[in-house]
Amino acid sequence: MKNKFIVLIIFSACIILLSFANNASDHSISKKDIELKIPKGFPKPIYDFKNNKISPEGFILGRKLFYDPILSKDSSTSCQSCHQRVAAFAHIDHTLSHGIDGKIGTRNVPAIQNMIWKDTYMADGGVNNMEVQPINPLTNPIEMNESLAHIIFKLKQKKEYVALFKKAYKDTIINSERLLKSLAQFTGLMISANSRYDKYLSGKDTFSIQEKSGLQLFRAKCSGCHQEPLFTDNSYRNNGLMADSSLNDIGRGRITKIEGDNFKFKVPSLRNIEMTFPYMHDGRYRKLKDVLNHYSSTISHNKTTDEDVTKIGSLSDKERKDIIAFLLTLTDKEFLNDKRFVDPNRK
Amino acid sequence: MKKRGYLLFGVLLYFLTSPSHSNAQHSSKGMLSITFFHYVDSLVLNLDSTTYKNSFGQAYTVSNFKYYISNIHLKQADGTEYISHDYFLINEEEEKSKKIVLTHIPKGNYTSISYMIGVDSLHNCSGAQSGALDETNGMFWAWNTGYIFLKLEGKSSFSKSPGNIFEYHIGGYKSPANSIRTVLLKLEQPLLIENTKTEAMKIKVNVAEILKTPSNIDFTKMSSVTDTRNASIIADNYKDMFIIEK
């Protein structure tokens, strides 16, 4: 009897321990997890981590920061408030981003994926290096409204961060360079390349007749800008949206001050497009149907409207449906469910 | 086999510990300190107190004055050059920042000094950095990424900006909005750099030049430059604000 009791205790202790271990391993990151694997057919990345060597500890620190509202002035807003994992780190259903005090931003939140293949960031390409991109939301009065110096001050007060920085960088210095580089380790590894489209290309999946037709149409009409395999050629184009006079967003022209760049925006990737609605820099379209309707029949012709858009011409009902069916094959369930990117505070 | 191993180890140890060629040269290198003195024409720069006048006779005070100095080259008559790879943020408010020290300068007679006012294009694109280039120094534009090379802020009742302030934040490293300017100063007396000695150089900086020649700045018309649009106008003004004090 007594023996049985001891066995029971040991047994339940084991179960408890095991469940703890399991819980911990859910968020644990190994050397293998942070290996940078360039997907087949992808070009050489532009951001190469040469000056920011990825480590499990650096990635873990970056992830912790990404999900921590301590980065905002009133501890209300974290990166994930706008960039939600289930939406490929875009924001579901807000046309314009919502920040601190419920203030509304001027642009729609884009996905964070395949960032290391971009030469510039933001819809107007104003940011020239992935590492410095977060300074924008962090310090923008209508986003997180905090100063970099004060964030560093706050992090230094937190034992947990002192330990995490030390683990990642082997000494006790906490500065903005390390903050930004850790965030870049986390966001830079957000790579989406396992959609049904990718599997179709490598012969691991098949397409329906409709999807095949959609791919063909896409290659004929859209890939001049949304170039495979990243679904962007990194250029700035005017895709014929009627300018919204309330926002007066002139896009690339704001950065270059060249009139011929007005109303051009960086061609966005279309990977995970099913999840990243609403669409366009200002989120004006809620459905892919609306986007196809735009390309087919509401192109606004102004000075900088791109030839590649004007030549698309009108698309039949069937053509639109086929293209949409193809676009849905770009959803990457493995990326959307990737455990490495899950909020570490979630049990 | 074992013996040979020891031998190899010994040779390696010798190379690792013996004074190397470059170390030997080290001792024949000198240092140079450069101190920047800030003036407004004939008056010393005093933040928020002394009143100055621009070329239109408009009175103003200065509340903030900072700039980057980088890519410093010292040249000898035979063309030999010493290049410093350090970045310096000179800030009127911080006395210490106004004196910079260059080290490991090879012995020689230097006849000119040149440097960039600002930050080269490579370092404008290099991502997160620390030290003088730390983004927390407030000399960085995040939305149109790049460093602010020079900041001059102050007040003038002629300015139509809220609070009568004026602000000139000058930056931009890409044409057509390139505001990187390089200064070349000839040394009338060649500067002799010798072993282990620290030479001193004084450079006078005339803040008034930021607001004149070739373009006289009228506070009523241009009180705020905070992106690359008009920056090069101001950069062309200030590129001749430095003179070596004898």
Image: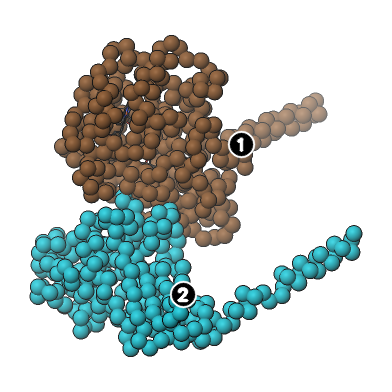
Chain colours: A brown, B cyan
Task: Tell me, for residue A25, which label it has, or none.
Answer: 1
Image quadrant for the C terminus of chain B? bottom left
Mark 1 belongs to chain: A
- Figure check: A128 above or below B2: above
Question: How many discs mark residues in the rendered view?
Answer: 2
Left-right relation of B200 to A317: right
The residue identified by callout 2 is: B81
Image quadrant for the N terminus of chain B? bottom right
Q: Is residue B11 visible?
A: yes
Q: Nearer the viewer, mark 2 or mark 1?
A: 2
Which residue sits at x=38%, y=61%? B120
Q: Identify which residue, B93 or A14, lies in the foreground.
A: B93
Amino acid on which disc 1 is placed: Ser
Which residue sits at x=9%, y=75%? B57
Element type where label 1 sits in the image: helix
Q: Identify which residue, A307 or B145, lies in the foreground.
A: A307
- Figure check: A44 above or below B218: above
Quarter of the view holding residue B48: bottom left
Amino acid on which disc 2 is placed: Glu
Residue B24 in picture, x, y percent from top left:
63, 79
Q: Identify which residue, A336 or B216, lies in the foreground.
A: B216
Work out how far the residue at label 2 is from the one at label 1, CA to CA, in angstroms: 57 Å
Left-right relation of A194 to B233: right
